[in-house]
Image (spheres, rainbow, N blue to C red):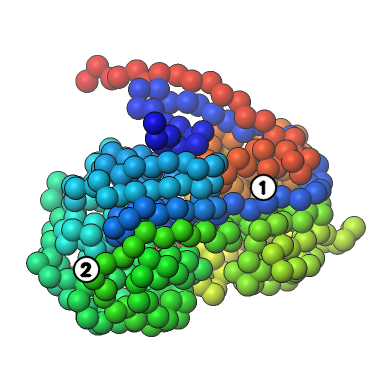
Amino acid sequence: MHRLCYNIEVPKKESVALEKFLITGGVKLKGEVTISGAKNAAVAILPATLLADGPCVIENVPNISDIAVITRILSDMGAEIRYLDKTTIEINTAGVASHIVPYEMTKQLRASSYFMGAMLGRFGKAKVSLPGGCDLGARPIDQHLKGFSCLGADCTIEHGMVNIEARNLTGSQVYFDCNSVGATINVMMAAVKASGLTVIENAAKEPHVVDMANFLNSMGADIMGAGTDVIKIRGVGRLRGACYSVIPDQIEAGTYMVAAAITRGDVLIRNVIPKHLEPIITKLERIGVCVDQFDESVRVWVPDRRKFECTSIKTMAHPGFPTDMQPQIAALLCLAEGTSIITEGIFDNRFKYADELMRMGADISVDGKVAVIQGVEALTGAPVRATDLRAGAALVLAGLAARGCTEIEDIYHIQRGYEDMEGKLRGLGARIALKRSAVSMVSSAV
Ligand code: EPZ
């Protein structure tokens, strides 16, 4: 019997489990927390096992609902999935014969787009529904399709499905018009089996792009330059199964760093790669937070009576300040003295959390891609709603610091990308509980 996922269920269609976090703020977080594997690496590496002609063992896989969806899709396609322990998965995709990826699941997450590159590399064709994921404004896939076309594939979109077919995938020059993590990873997957040399220019340099290249190389691919603007991929005839460990999640780590800072606590954050945290550390220290770096951990603490300083932040592609940390640092800046400016350099609409923070007494005004934050003395607990994954994380952080009780709805967004957040925070002394009430969806008469 192959367990599909360890203990996270993919939300069932017929009933929506209304889960909420209840947080009573004011506790200084103390102690140690261990970071899980990187969501944005794992959601790419698991589909990439389709490229292997033998079983793969992937370690340090985060126990989150996005992974449950990915493993469910792979299983529905005929892959054999076996959990060897809570974070280690054995995947054998030899039994996958179809190049079509089921619709219902793929629409739930952005990472479903990775099945395009993996199937193209495996079968020379793919039929995948347009991806879903956090609503952060326009999230086109034109650069993905541009890259596939450069490799000789025909790409069409009909009835919400992306149809990609290539008689022969042939290595080529691919120049991205914008820095795209997804397009870089997707074209890498298609190119590893293309004949000849592919050169990707203006490639994304995020740690999870490098992790993906390392995984593909562990299967026998020939990829050089990942982590720089130019990635060279020499196609190979076959890729073998491999055993690989996912890197730690830099964004989860950054989130707990802000949790320690915003509660003026003292926390040791284990299983990190400090180099991946540099842009976050720089900004936290500028705000007045102390960060001690060790080989695989960081200690985050705030001296007594230290006031947080306002600052300006512009989110950029790596190694700039990561957009996925923008809502979290905004929550901290709500309590900094003076006026802070946040410019969102990646997505069109990543300030939806601002209205929710204002219900807690924050002073934020948003104009397009710029938020102006006037620091306030304190936040107060309130009923709020998670609008997306990182927005939800920001509301948790604000709740930890706020006076009184905060109730956060729609936490399924948070559970997509954070493993056992309430358990990890409770382990640091936070007063957080999960409140669960299920209602069945009443199918409308019309
Ligand atoms: C990945 O999304 C991450 N998701 C996002 O994390 C992250 O915010 C983003 O990279 C940037 O780092 C996953 O890895 C599953 P992009 P992705 O392609 O690949 C535009 C989280 O919170 N663009 O780098 O979709 C796009 O609209 C999530 O963990 C095109 O115009 O991001 C955006 O403005 C949220 N055409 C910018 O590029 C394309 O074909 C960056 O997008 C592709 C992207």
Asked whether the viewer can see residue 55, the reply is: yes
**Is 169 situated left or right of 75 in this image?**
left
**Is 152 situated left or right of 237 in this image?**
left
The amino acid on which the numbered mark 2 sits, given as a three-letter code, is Phe
- Can you tell which quarter of the image residue 232 is in? bottom left
Q: Is disc 2 placed on a helix, strand or loop?
A: helix
**Is 121 situated left or right of 200 in this image?**
left
Q: Position of residue 358 (x, y in %)?
A: 61, 45
Q: Position of residue 388 (x, y in %)?
A: 48, 46
Quadrant containing the N terminus is top left
The amino acid on which the numbered mark 1 sits, given as a three-letter code, is Leu
Q: Quadrant holding ligand 1?
A: bottom left
- Can you tell which quarter of the image residue 154 is in? bottom left
- Residue drawn 29% across the image and 58% down it: 53
- Residue drawn 76% across the image and 44% down it: 428
- Residue drawn 51% across the image and 63% down it: 323
Q: CA distance from mark 1 to mark 2?
A: 40 Å
Q: Position of residue 230 (x, y in %)?
A: 38, 83
Asked whether the viewer can see residue 262, the reply is: no
The disc at residue 148 is: 2
Q: Position of residue 74 (x, y in %)?
A: 32, 45
The residue to which callout 1 is attached is 397
